[in-house]
Amino acid sequence: MANERTTLLPKDRSQTLTRRARPTRCGWKMLSVAAVITLSFSVIVFLRSRRASVPEVVDHEFGVGFDLTSPYGTAAISYPNGTIVNVAKIDASSSYQEMMSRLSLDSSRHLHPPYNSLKDYFRDRPRQLAREARKAAGLPATSDVGELAQLILSLRSSVETYLSGRKISGAVATIPHLPALYQEDLEDAFEYAGLIYIPYYPYWFGGVFYETAAVYAANGFGLCSDYKDPVSCDHERKNPPHQPRNENVLCVSYTRGMLASTWASEGMGFAFPASEGPIVADLSLGWDKRDENPREEYYWAGVRDAIIKPVLEANKYIPRETNKILLHGDCALDESFRKVLEEAVESVLPKKTDIFELDPVYSAGRGAAEMAKQVYWNYSHNLTAEACLDCEL
């Protein structure tokens, strides 16, 4: 019996030790899970703490404008006395340029607000929930929003440096009309950058301020002689003293990374996106792409076709006059391009049309800055678009 007990004792002790070891392994698992949760929570808190908060009001009378084009962005300031200052031109990252190229494709389109039906709203909910989750975690709503926000932050830094450290609270961004670059992306990018997005309720009802309207304003068209005099400004909008109330323009942007051509209706006040007509935005026809064709004349033939395509589409059924040609972009004054442009428009327009090219590198940003200044002044003086629909703000 003694031998049996002796034999059984190690076995019983081993079982006891095994039973005691199990809670230890479970404990380590629980500790690991708790550590992961704590670390994740700490990361979220850290990211949210680094994310800038959006001010409640715009606290400056000058307007700040950003042009988010490809492959760069520009910043300008418009002061109440009429002075407009070009602040900075910043080259964008290669990932930003790749994003713009992708967003220029029709295949990149997706559902987005505002929706055409309740069905579209529910179909887009999973995507919207994913955006909201990233924002709640202190991240940009999407990787595209992050790219836009980084360029906005760089432009903001340049403006604040120019202002000797004075912080800005809101701005207007203008963009080329790309098929898959939406209002929600701009709003979320500004939110991530800690800035008020002025081209949206309650300041303005357009949502997106495209480059065509910005360049039109930067060349001195569609503006009141004194935006602080609402009575005379309203009269000038209804009876423009120096231009038609509405006119058709061909706006061509030519940069190192993109060729864009837009036929649109512009007029007094800042045009709404609905005024944009036929559009071509081709990132394979930027200045830097001219050597990628077997022969250079093939490249220029593509440029010519892209320039006139919106005009041909606008006149497909009813002949309509093109009153002005607007030109902008950092390569807009290139001699070869100008020659092709002039030959192209002469081939499709029945009469000679004036070309306007004031400060082509910064003109879109300057127009955005002017818009920011005037729209916020109207809002702060209780002249919102809602209260002045008959003024065609």
Image (cartoon, rainbow, N blue to C red):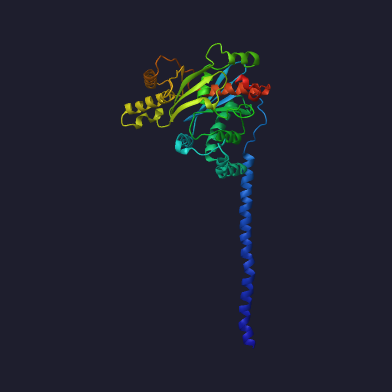
Residue drawn at 63 percent across, 59 percent down: 30
> Quick one: 260 or 338, which is closer to the camera?
260
> Which quadrant, please, contains the N terminus?
bottom right
Residue drawn at 64 percent across, 62 percent down: 27
Could one spot residue 49 in this view of the protein? yes
> Quick one: 226 or 296, which is closer to the camera?
226
Q: Position of residue 324 (x, y in %)?
A: 46, 17
Q: Position of residue 364 (x, y in %)?
A: 52, 23
> Quick one: 196 or 21, which is closer to the camera?
196
- Find the residue positioned furthest to the bottom: 1
Q: In the picture, residue 208 is in which quadrant? A: top right
- Find the residue positioned furthest to the left: 295
Q: Is residue 37 above or below residue 255?
A: below
Q: In the picture, residue 317 is in which quadrant? A: top left
Q: Position of residue 74 (x, y in %)?
A: 52, 26
> Quick one: 57 or 280, which is closer to the camera?
280
Could one spot residue 229 in this view of the protein? no
Q: Is residue 198 left or right of residue 324?
A: right
Q: Is residue 231 above or below residue 96?
A: above
Q: Position of residue 9 (x, y in %)?
A: 63, 80
